[in-house]
Image (cartoon, grey):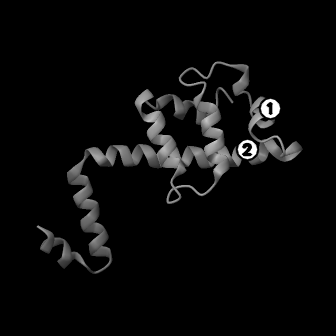
């Protein structure tokens, strides 16, 4: 798993973002699967290098998902995919938070698509 897309993405997190990302994935609005949180909490112990035998797929499977048995690798790949998608969403949110003009543009688009663009102009 050390050369996986998930590990490569996790390496992109800044140390200060580790806890923020954990809170993000623990939020029911973004994630309802505790297995995703479990996988992240396990992997973050090896941040930023992830240079341990304990980050290999079979080892993670035994430690994090011991009841999954022989179908576990496939199931774990689905969990990893969900975690990848959440990382993408987290990065988008972090960048969007920095750009107030883009936020306003998206808000206008949201109101406009719902027929409420008049409301947006009344906010100013």
Q: Which residue is mark 1?
A: 58
Does the CB distance between marks 2 and 1 fall below 8 Å? Answer: no
Q: Quadrant of the N terminus?
A: top right
Q: Residues within 10 Å of mark 2 (few under 14, many from 20)?
A: many
Q: Is residue 27 left or right of residue 1?
A: left
Label ID, residue 108? none
Classify the position of the C terminus by image quarter: bottom left
The residue lying toward the viewer, choosing from 47 and 71, is 47
Q: Position of residue 12 (x, y in %)?
A: 47, 30
Would residue 110 appear left or right of 62 to someone viewing this image? left
Residue depicted at 20% across the width and 53% down the height: 101
Left or right of 67? Residue 48 is left
Q: Which residue is mark 2?
A: 76
User: Which residue lies at the image location 30% right of the left edge and 47% below the top edge?
Assistant: 97
> What is the crowding at mark 1: few (fewer than 14 residues within 10 Å), some, or many (at least 20)?
some
Residue at 19% x, 76% y is 119
Asked if residue 123 lies left or right of residue 113, the reply is left
Residue occupying the far left of the picture: 124
Question: Which comes sooner in the sequence, label 2 or label 1?
Answer: 1
- The residue shown at (36%, 44%) is 94
CA gap, disc 2 and disc 1: 10 Å
Q: SS of the residue at dot 1?
A: helix
* Residue 4 versus residue 102 in the image, above or below: above
Q: Position of residue 22 (x, y in %)?
A: 51, 42
Count of labels in the image: 2
Q: What secondary structure is found at the residue carrying circle 2? A: helix
| Residue 70 point in image, percent of width and height | 88, 43
Looking at the picture, how far across and down is residue 29, in whole percent?
50, 60
Q: Among all residues in the image, which is located at the extreme right?
A: 70
Q: Quadrant of residue 3?
A: top right
Q: Nearer the viewer, residue 110 or 97?
A: 97
């Amino acid at each position: 798993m050390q050369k996986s897309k998930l590990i490569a993405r996790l390496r992109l997190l800044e140390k200060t973002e580790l806890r923020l990302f954990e809170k993000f994935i623990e939020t029911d609005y973004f994630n309802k699967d505790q297995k995703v949180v479990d996988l992240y909490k396990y992997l973050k112990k090896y941040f930023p290098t992830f240079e341990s035998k304990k980050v290999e797929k079979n080892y993670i499977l035994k430690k994090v998902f011991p009841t999954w048995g022989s179908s576990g690798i496939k199931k774990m790949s689905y969990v990893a995919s969900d975690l990848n998608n959440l990382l993408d969403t987290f990065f988008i949110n972090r960048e969007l938070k920095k750009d107030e003009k883009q936020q306003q543009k998206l808000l206008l688009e949201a109101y406009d698509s719902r027929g409420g663009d008049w409301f947006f102009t009344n906010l100013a």
